[in-house]
Image (spheres, helix red, strand yellow):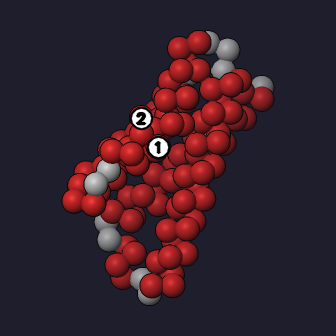
Amino acid sequence: MYLKILEILFGSLAFILLLLMLFRELGITKKLSPMRASDYISSMAGFLLLYIVFAFVLAIFTPIGINKMVMALFGISPFIIGKLVTYKKVRVYSFIQILCVILSLVYVYII
């Protein structure tokens, strides 16, 4: 029962993070004032932190070993992508991160 609640919470966080990342890539923050844009990016970072924490919590409490590894991989993926990103290719890596969030969202509802 608690595992289903964690999965629903993770799915909700992943969905909100996905929307925030998509709006950022579509240029919504370019139309905002600098103060509002920084607030937007800060809230996106907060949701990313919650996404990582809940991915690791699911990795701990999921009973099947392969699901543990996949959820841990989704939790560590922002750090891997962040290590590889360069300023010139930030847009490409942003779309890779969005793809990872979509895959994790789909995966959580499959398991």
Q: Which mark is residue 1?
A: none
Q: Is residue 104 above or below residue 43?
A: above
* Left or right, residue 40 beside residue 30: right
Question: Which is more toward the observer, 95 or 78?
Answer: 78
- Which residue in the protein does label 1 denote? 79
Q: Earlier in the sequence, mark 2 or mark 1?
A: 1
Measured as percent of width and height from the top left, residue 19 is found at: 45, 57
Q: Which residue is mark 2?
A: 103
Whether residue 9 sits left or right of residue 85 in the image: it is: right
Q: Position of residue 74 (x, y in %)?
A: 49, 34
71 horizontally vs 8: left or right: left
Quarter of the image containing the C terminus?
top right
Q: Residue furthest left?
A: 88
User: What residue is rendered at 46% in x and 44% in y?
Assistant: 78
Q: What's under tag 1, amino acid-wise?
A: Phe
Q: Position of residue 30 (x, y in %)?
A: 34, 78
Asked whether residue 14 is in view, the answer is yes
Q: In the image shown, does 12 or 67 lie closer to the viewer?
A: 67
* Residue found farthest to the right: 2
Q: Residue at position x 68%, y 25% from top?
A: 60
Please tell me whether mark 2 or mark 1 is closer to you in this view. 1
